[in-house]
Amino acid sequence: MKLLRRKKGPSLDSRLTALLEAVELAEGRLPAEAVAAARGVTERAGVRRRLSVEHTVAALAGATGSGKSSLFNTLAGDELSAVGVTRPTTATAQAALWDGEGAGPLLDWLEVPRRHSASSADLSGLVLLDLPDHDSIRLAHRLEVDRLVELVDLLVWVLDPQKYADAAVHERYLRPLAGHQDVMVVVLNQIDRLPEAAVARCLGDLRRLLDEDGLTGVPVVGVSARTGAGLAELRALLAKRVSERRSWSARLAADVVTAADHLILASATAPAQQDGGEAGTGSGGAESVRVADGRGAELVRMADGPGTGRLDRPLTAALSKAAGVPLVVEAVRKGHRHRAVVATGWPVTRWIRRFRPDPLRRLRIGLSAGSSEGEMVGHTSLPAASVVQRGQVETAIRDVGEGAAADLPGAWGAAVRRAARSREAELADAVDRAVGRTSLRETRRPRWWRAVNVLQWLLFATMVAGGGWLGALLAMDYLRLPQPPLPTAGELPWPTVLLAGGALAGVLVALLSRLAAWLGGRRRARRAAKALHEAIGQVGQEYVLGPVAEELTRYDRFAEVIEVARA
């Protein structure tokens, strides 16, 4: 994996901060091993920066028989490490310190108890470690090597002519550390065992192998600890690295890039199956993580109000059908007509309508007993969604997840699909509440009903007055009492006009009110359908699109900070 190099990029602190944020964003989304490894890098970096930056910790690492200990003794100028034919010789790491004042806490952190002083002005500030053999037959030795290889500032790999091409060192250490070529040196030791002409060939072949490992910039030095050949060049190289005092920061920077690349590769890996969902397909490689074209922000905007995006329309339609919106709309239309008849019908017959239940109240949509205006108490009595309708909702939710996860790396795509289903169990109750709350607005009585009701009672009173007048006249005639003067309206007496006119006017007003109620019912039904779809759309955005938007926004931010970490 190639590093993205720039002439001027973010500081090490900024990159570490970005990596830590990427780790926090990836928690629970990417494989725990990759996340833990990246978190470990940030923790190690924090500790290393607090310790002595005036010292450079270099480690001599190699296989059994490579001559690490001999080279260690030669560089230190003393027999500090035992050398012999019995393998393995080095059991624990030990350190040689050039001007080691202040390096104690650093070596404590490295857990290297064996420490020796060395003197050489050109290597002042160097802490040189002699590590156990990485191919030791003892597991504890190999684990000690792996631990220190992760911590030291500069890695000096000591190879020998017999095993410099050994796959163990190349596949287990050199190739995985390709991003650390700025803090690595490769030494071909024991060149005194080769004919002079063979030394160049071995160094050339080693150079070829390192290039294949991705370590094109790593210095290769041929030395002999026994004869001293090449040691001056190696000392000069070490002295240069130590004097720059940059190996520790270069090592941390390389660790950050490697950890970021591992997070990217982990992002591109699609889990086989998580939470009952189907796995997505993600492309591999570091280039697979990119900003998700602002889809997270788009969905956040959709969640703030009624959405019209391609993802929420099918979801809203499926939820509306499952919630029984067509049934509610019809109930709104019929309920409006029912209440209009009760409020504006002819008083002589309107009482009959009271024996018919209100369609909305029958569905428990409307104000419940003891509830306040606009408050929904309990659940509605709408029929439960059928198997087909539930399947349509599940399909719509899955389509939202798949659509939002399109082109995302595998692990992030799986996280988005899980987010789409994260609140699926709450949807039915949320939609039911939205239906109940939205329908309450359609139970409010128009003001004209009250006016018509007053008019109807006035007409009814007129009819009663006319009937009473006629009744009084009939009673007086029956009792043979003298008849009072009877006013007329044209040819008709006023009692008859009042009785007949009140009755006919009341019926006419009732018929006209029914026509108005029919038109009003259609209008309210259309308004209720729109309001219900908007309310259910908002539920879909809150319970499905909202979590998806948050996950996409989380991925967008991850892609941004991971690029900062890799810069």
Image: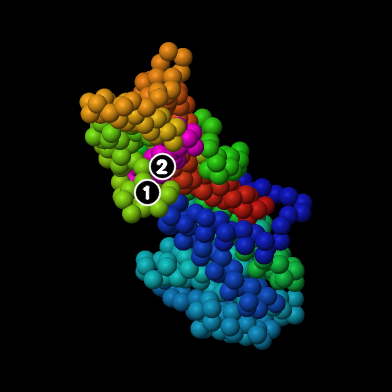
Residue 434 lies in magenta, yes or no?
yes
Across and down, in percent, residue 48 comes to 60, 73
Residue that carries the numbered disc 1 in the rendered image = 376
- Within 10 Å of disc 1 (Cα), the crowding (few <14, some 14-19, many 20+) is many
Label 2 is placed on what type of residue?
Leu
Q: Is residue 112 above or below residue 398?
A: below
Q: Is residue 100 above or below residue 335?
A: below
Foreground pick, 373 / 1: 373
Say what secondary structure mark 1 lies in: loop
Q: Which of the labelled discs sits on residue 151, or is there none?
A: none
Residue that carries the numbered disc 2 in the rendered image = 440
Label 1 is placed on what type of residue?
Met
Residue under the image location 31 percent in, 39 percent down = 361
Instruction: Please give the range of residues in magenta.
Output: 427-453
Q: Is residue 369 above or below residue 249?
A: above
Question: Which quadrant of the figure has residue 91?
Answer: bottom left
Q: Are marks 1 and 2 in contact (CB under 8 Å)?
A: yes
Answer yes or no: is residue 169 visible.
Answer: no
Across and down, in percent, residue 195 comes to 60, 55
Of label 1 and label 2, which has the lower sequence position? 1
